[in-house]
Amino acid sequence: MLFGLFKPRTAPPPPPAPVSAPRERADALLKRLDWTVIRRLDGLLQGDFRSLMRGSGLDLADLREYQHHDDVRHIDWNVTARLQQPHVRVFTEDREMAAWFLLDLSPSVDFGSGPQRKSTVLRDAVAVLARLITRHGNRVGALLYGSRGQPVVDAVLPARGGRAHVLRLIHLIQPPPAPAAAPQGGASHSHGTRLADLLTAAARTVRQRATVFVVSDFISEPGWEQPLGELARRHDVVAVRLLDPLELELPDLGLIPIRDAETGEQLLVDTHDAGFRQRFARIAAQREAQLRESLSRAGVDTLELSTDDDLADAVLRFVDLRQRRSRLGRGAQRMAGQHLSPAGTPQGARS
């Protein structure tokens, strides 16, 4: 499979980052994101981040008559119509709500055709979401896949709250110093990504209902669709899909060597060939359609993050999607509740 797995070798790898205190690097990153992304979201969303975690940790506890200063948004109009007296819903806050990040750090994620790699987008997105969630009293945990170069779940971070915990998460997903270049004729990896292993491990680890962010480019061996659907039946699952424009369409760069980031296989391709570029785009479009159909069939919301995207804009689009779907769901529930009363009479009918 060509697209998404191969990375052009048109430029040498960047030099290893200087050795410094990892905690300081994570802290500097979080401060930068606080200024560039989180403060901007604060202004645009007015502090309402409940759509990031569906249900916002509230459980319906009781119904009672409306009292002065009650929030009119909590009025139960069905009960009010039946009893001819305004009634409001009373909620209790579930303080055990948690968010879990399932992080695919396999080699194909370490790719980017521009200034940013998908791994950088992953790191920034997780840092922003984790900061927003923990800042409002919830907890975050994480399962890491492939963080040490092997296709296995190799780290589990228990769900906890606080800024220090977010810094620890950022430190875990910071890319290590670049290794020495492998010989050109050899393959540095012998196995592809098995996203199903990460999802299965999450089903065993995350016992209580939670919001689960699956952050991956979904370039994986087949078989992940069923575990994802099973996870979505128990939890509120969001697929955070990472992509790069070069995975969808190739520019005319002439004859270039490319390498499969998963297996190390190398090929020489002629991107000057218009027919080759068209076949590449057609196959990429087919994969896009299949992937979106699989995610929809699993019953998960999807947040797409491209390496050329603005992170704040992408989060805003996602929050707007969740809010619209939530309103549609509430409208459907109200319509269903108005069909029949307990006595079998339409609730909207008058005697």
Image: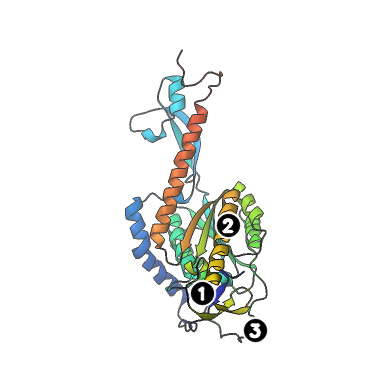
Q: Which residue lies furthest to the left in this view?
A: 43
Give the residue drawn at x 56%, y 19%: 344
Q: In this view, does 221 lie above or below 65?
A: below
Q: Mark 2 falls on what kind of element?
A: helix
Mark 3: few/some/many CA within 10 Å (<14, 14-19, 20+): few
Is residue 203 toward the left or the right of residue 257 in the image? right
Separation of marks 3 and 2 at Cα, in angstroms:
31 Å
Say which label, 3 or 2, has the lower sequence index.
Answer: 3
Give the residue drawn at x 56%, y 69%: 3
Which residue corresponds to mark 2?
291
Question: Are the two marked residues, 3 and 1, in contact with CB atoms closer than 8 angstroms?
Answer: no
Question: Are the two marked residues, 1 and 2, in contact with CB atoms closer than 8 angstroms?
Answer: no
Q: In this view, does 146 lie above or below 11?
A: above
Mark 2: few/some/many CA within 10 Å (<14, 14-19, 20+): some
Give the residue drawn at x 64%, y 75%: 263
Separation of marks 3 and 1 at Cα, in angstroms:
23 Å
In-front residue for pair 59/103: 103
Kind of residue indicated by mark 1: Pro
Mark 1: few/some/many CA within 10 Å (<14, 14-19, 20+): some
Q: For the residues carrying marks 1 and 2, which lies nearer the camera in this image?
A: 2
Say which label, 1 or 2, has the lower sequence index.
Answer: 1
Kind of residue indicated by mark 2: Leu
Q: Where's residue 18, x and y in %?
A: 45, 83
Which residue corresponds to mark 3?
186
Q: Where's residue 338, x and y in %?
A: 49, 26
Q: Mark 3 falls on what kind of element?
A: loop
Image quarter in which the N terminus is found? bottom right
Q: Mark 1 falls on what kind of element?
A: loop
Which residue corresponds to mark 1?
175
Kind of residue indicated by mark 3: Gly
Give the residue drawn at x 58%, y 64%: 283
Q: Where's residue 195, x and y in %?
A: 63, 62
